[in-house]
Image (cartoon, rainbow, N blue to C red):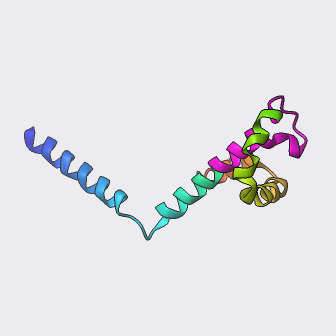
Amino acid sequence: MPNEKLEKFLEWGRLFFQGATDFGRKSRSMLEKEANDEMDNFILLCFADTLGIPLPTSYYTLELLPYLAEDFEMWERRMLNRKSIWGEKWGDYDLDA
């Protein structure tokens, strides 16, 4: 019994360090994509009125515009080029939905 726990712990440790040091594979691109998606969602929450979605707090979020100005034009292009956000999200999980 204690031997099985030790083996499980060692397997967990091996998988942890394999994932933590997996710099050259898919994990880095997945992290970058997720970070870009989160930034896109944040900018959408702040500046949705530029896409025609009414936002009552747009007056207050304009104070963030100088800090996000570099990313704003590319964000707007990405948002307008999206056909279906749901389709993109389901595509990440390789499901036949």
- In this view, the residue in front, 53 or 24, is 53
Q: Is residue 96 visible?
A: no
Horizontal and vertical percent position of residue 94: 60, 54
From the image, give the main secondary structure of the stretch colored magenta.
Answer: helix
In the rendered view, tell whether residue 55 sits above or below residue 86.
above
Horizontal and vertical percent position of residue 96: 66, 51
* Residues shaded magenta: 38-58
Which residue is farthest top?
56
Is 62 covered by the magenta stretch? no
Q: Residue at x 91, y 41 (%)?
A: 52
Q: Residue at x 38, y 64 (%)?
A: 22
Is 41 covered by the magenta stretch? yes
Q: In terms of image quadrants, where is residue 19?
A: bottom left
- Which quadrant does the N terminus fall into? top left
1 to the left or right of 87 = left
Q: Is residue 11 visible?
A: yes
Q: Residue at x 72, y 44 (%)?
A: 64
Horizontal and vertical percent position of residue 69: 75, 55
- In this view, the residue in front, 87 or 53, is 53
Horizontal and vertical percent position of residue 84: 79, 50
Q: In terms of image quadrants, where is residue 21?
A: bottom left
- In this view, the residue in front, 20 or 76, is 76
Q: Residue at x 20, y 46 (%)?
A: 8
60 to the left or right of 10 = right
